Image (spheres, rainbow, N blue to C red):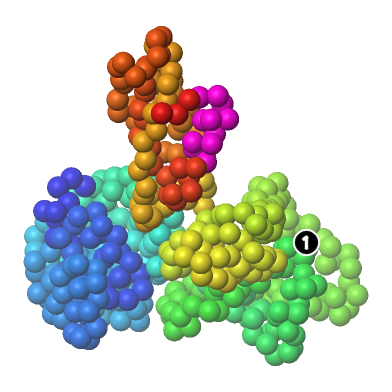
Amino acid sequence: MTCNEDIKISVIGGTRGLGKWIAEQLRYDNFDVTITSRNKVSGMKVAKKLKVNYTDDNIEAIENSDIVIYSVPIEYMVDTIADTAGYAKPGSLLIDVTSVKMQPSDALSKYAPDGVEILPTHPMFGPRISSLDGQVVILTPIEDRCNMWYSRVYSYLKEKSAKIVVSTPEEHDKTMSVVQGLTHFSYISIASTIRKLGVSVKKSRDFASPVYSLMLDMISRIVSQNPYLYYSIQKSNNQTAHSREVLIGEMRYLADLVLDSNEDEFVENMIKSARYLDEFEEALGRSDKAISILTEDVKFIKNSIGKEIGLKHQYSGNIHIGEVIKADSDNVQLVNLKGKTVNLKISNVNILSDDEIFTWKKENMPLHRYDVSLLLPKECEGDVFVDMISKIGPAFDVELIDVYDGKQIKDGFMSFTFSYHVFSPDGRIVVEDYLKALGFEIR
């Protein structure tokens, strides 16, 4: 979308969760954003932090917006649309971002006036992600109800490198009854079973294969989030009830096969299921990659003891750069650049590249500038030495600032003066000692 600052967007329910994340992203992209909520005190506080507008009047927000994004809990979505959609101005666009699509789609179709476009949408991610890059966004356009805005929304998501899936509300809900409903219900059931069995999760990890650890991480990720949301997902999608019943029936059937010592039928069932899924190689590759990432991170950090590394916390976004002093399979301890000891869980951090560490230091640390003058033969080219000094560990932003050929300079030579920056005054010693070791004469 061009001229973002001219497009007014209201996020209904934009002070928490996904709504807040959407508002923040849109504000970052220079849209004119307004958020609403029923709690004026907290709403104004969030708006100030995000640098967006706030109102506690949904109708006022909708009347003045080019795009309205409904981000309220599933159980309130239809009523919220029914109460407010009629106030949308001609030519505007109404979007909902719930995890079910048939009911909100019907409500938008029913209550949005003629001349107001609608685009039911399902972002397949939560508010913890840092960007849309690689994230799935499902669009379920209704025929002849999004002719003007559809291509603009699609292009915006594409520019953000989101993975866009186009579906119908009916296909969406049937598929999501498995993708979300069945998956969440299975994970929540396993967590509940482990709790009732009284098995120590921490102890079980000592016995675990990488596959179990990865599965346990996914289960913990689900059950540690908003339980009301997950109940709503189970309750709101009518297709999910059928998926749950089929799952429970299959579990009983397979359990009976084991109890009856019916090995042949159990094996045949597994073989049929494997053939139906028909993606062994792809699944093995993806799971191997996920396991490899976990183990490689641990290996890299353990091998970095005594060395400087950079780590970014996945959730807070905080950067920690320092020398690793201790590391095991779960935790890392480092002394940061301020001399403070920091303890982090390896599962919660991403390892920064050398370029990322350098960029962070350059933006956040005091820089020290020094000059060095070298006596060099007249035929030397200064640019060659700029490149050479730039490759000396601590030095960066090297420039040739002066060339001098005076009485003090011996015949056949010239004085080349270079400026450079380092992060620490000790870097100057490193640079000059390196140049001396190469045989250069420093003035």
Report whether residue 243 is seen: no
Dot 1 corresponds to which residue? 270
Crowd tier of the residue under label 1, counting other residues whose Cα lies within 10 Å: few below 14, some 14–19, many 20 or above = few
Give the image location of residue 375, x and y in percent.
42, 21
Q: Residue at x 30, y 55 (%)?
A: 141
Residue at position x 52%, y 56% from top? Answer: 310
Q: Which residues are magenta?
A: 430-440
Magenta span dominant secondary structure? helix
Task: Reply yes or no: does residue 121 show up in magenta.
Answer: no
- In the rendering, at what x and y percent does residue 37 appear? 22, 80
Name the element at disc 1: helix
Q: Nearer the viewer, residue 17 or 440?
A: 440
Left or right of 113, for residue 236: right
Residue 382 lies in what quarter of the image? Answer: top left
Reply yes or no: does residue 434 show up in magenta.
yes
Seen from the viewer's position, the closer of residues 56 and 75 is 56
Task: Say which amino acid is labelled 1.
Answer: Met
